[in-house]
Image (cartoon, rainbow, N blue to C red):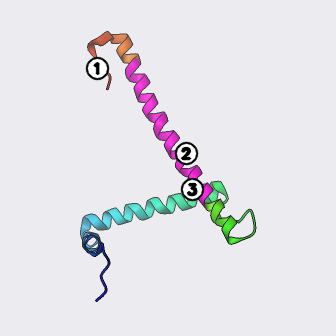
Amino acid sequence: MLRYPDQEAIDQALAYLETAEGQQTLSQRQQRAEWVMAEAKSFHGLPRALQPGLEKFKIQALLIASVQNLKRLVAARAQQLRIFLLRLAISLVFGNRLRLV
């Protein structure tokens, strides 16, 4: 019988997917993956190769994925910055009675 070095982890993951919580997690991940692919196709030109050749298309797909990741990183940092500035403004208005986290 062939067993992978991480077969125990694979068995645990498969067992988790059989639970109700695992099914819910899988559904959420599938929806998320579908949205990411739709974004790449609709807004970043994934359905067509800009240059001929499989290798160049792979590069294009990796660049699109990088752009998507950078967009999410910038959005997350912007949200963190807004929260920090709001807390700072409240601290300046109310003095040191509130703690900045």
Q: Residue at left 37%, top 22%?
A: 87
Q: Quadrant of the C terminus?
A: top left
Q: Tag 1, which secondary structure?
A: loop
Residue 98 sits in quarter: top left
Q: Position of residue 71 (x, y in %)?
A: 55, 45
> What is the span of residues highlighted in magenta in the rendered image?
62-88
On-image quarter of the N terminus: bottom left
Instruction: Give the vertical position of 50 relative to 75 (above or below).
Output: below
Q: Is residue 77 above or below residue 33?
A: above
Given residues 63 and 88, the one toward you in this image is 63
Q: 59 or 2, which lies in front?
A: 2
Dot 2 or dot 1, earlier in sequence: 2
The residue type indicated by label 2 comes to Lys
Considering every residue shown, the one lying at the far front of the view is: 5
Numbered disc total: 3
* Residue to which mark 3 is pinned: 65
- Residue at figure coordinates x 55%, y 61% from the top left: 37
Q: Residue type at mark 3? A: Ala
Q: For numbered disc 2, what is the local secondary structure? A: helix
- Residue assigned mark 1: 99
**In this view of the protein, which residue sits in the foreground, 7 or 41?**
7
Residue located 50% across and 46% down the image: 72
How far apart are labels 3 and 2 at the CA level?
10 Å
Q: How many residues crowd mark 1 within 10 Å: few (<14), some (14–19), many (20+)?
A: few
Establish if 81 lies above or below 11.
above
Tell me which amino acid carries mark 1.
Arg
